[in-house]
Image: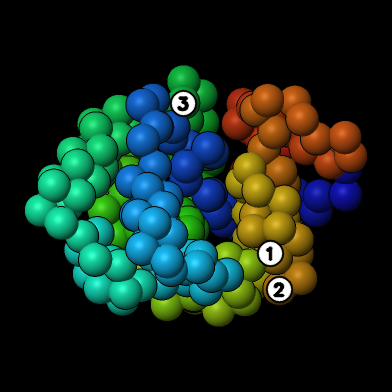
Amino acid sequence: MEKLDSSAVKAILFDVYGTLVEIGDKRAPFRQLIQIGAGQGRKPSAQDAAIIMGRAVGLQETANLLGIRLTDADRAHLESELATEIASITPFTDTLPVLHELKSRGFKLGLCSNLALDYAAPVTSSLPITLDAYVWSFDAAAIKPDSRIYERACRQLGCAPGEVLMVGDTVEADVDGPRAFGMQALLLDRKGRSSTGDAIASLSELCGLVSQSA
């Protein structure tokens, strides 16, 4: 594991989905939207993610931006799938205890996530604790690992990059990107798939790694 300078950490920034909360009933409505477009002859693009998660738009507006035509039946189906996903969002069992513990030690805490507009409110409602920063890709108009989203997070936290520890479940977005920006980072590998050893298996391990009081 890359050496963590725990004495420098004043704030901890978390990815959201797969890190703090999970979707119990995954329906992937935006992926279904892309598939509808493919059926109309539209080729998926590498820029699709930036449109879906980099702008504060809902399903229908996203379809319009992507040039995908939705029938009333398509729209109703996608909205239903989205509602089903949102209703199934819950925190992992270690999430709230760890957030409360870290907050009690004086660490600043924040969220930094790539997500579509509709997935933000369910997160804040499922985490009944006030955090110091909420950085959504659609507000930042940038998706991880774009450095602009990390810069926005550090600014909200009022910390220099080296004082912020990013924790998330995606190597490129939550480890490599933050480190390139000068932040510290840890990979959360809940399923034990990492072969590098540069990872923690649960959020509970984080409390031991940043044992010093902020």
- Counting other residues with Cα less than 10 Å from the Cα at mark 2, is it few (<14), some (14-19), or many (20 or more)? some
What residue is rendered at 37% in x and 48% in y?
32
Q: Nearer the viewer, residue 176 or 60?
A: 60
Say if 58 sits above or below 83 in the image.
Answer: below
Q: Position of residue 204 (x, y in %)?
A: 61, 26
Mark 2 residue type: Phe
Check whether the beta carbons of the residues at disc 1 and disc 2 lie within 8 A of each other: yes
- Asked if residue 189 lies left or right of residue 19, the reply is right
Q: Position of residue 209 (x, y in %)?
A: 73, 37
Secondary structure of the residue carrying tag 1 is helix
Mark 1 residue type: Pro
Q: Nearer the viewer, residue 31 or 22?
A: 31
What residue is rendered at 88% in x and 49% in y?
2
Residue 66 visible in the shown view: yes
Say if 78 sits above or below 145 in the image.
Answer: above
Which residue is under mark 1?
178
Mark 3 residue type: Phe
Q: Nearer the viewer, residue 4 or 20?
A: 20
Secondary structure of the residue carrying tag 3 is loop
Say if 116 sits above or below 143 in the image.
Answer: above
- Counting other residues with Cα less than 10 Å from the Cα at mark 1, is it few (<14), some (14-19), or many (20 or more)? many
Which residue is under mark 2?
181
Q: Position of residue 61 (x, y in %)?
A: 22, 69
- Looking at the image, tell me whether mark 3 or mark 1 is earlier in sequence order: 3
What residue is rendered at 20% in x and 49% in y?
74
Residue 214 visible in the shown view: no
Q: Residue 34 appears in which quarter of the rendering?
A: bottom left
Q: CA distance from mark 1 to mark 2?
A: 5 Å
Which residue is under mark 3?
92
Secondary structure of the residue carrying tag 2 is helix
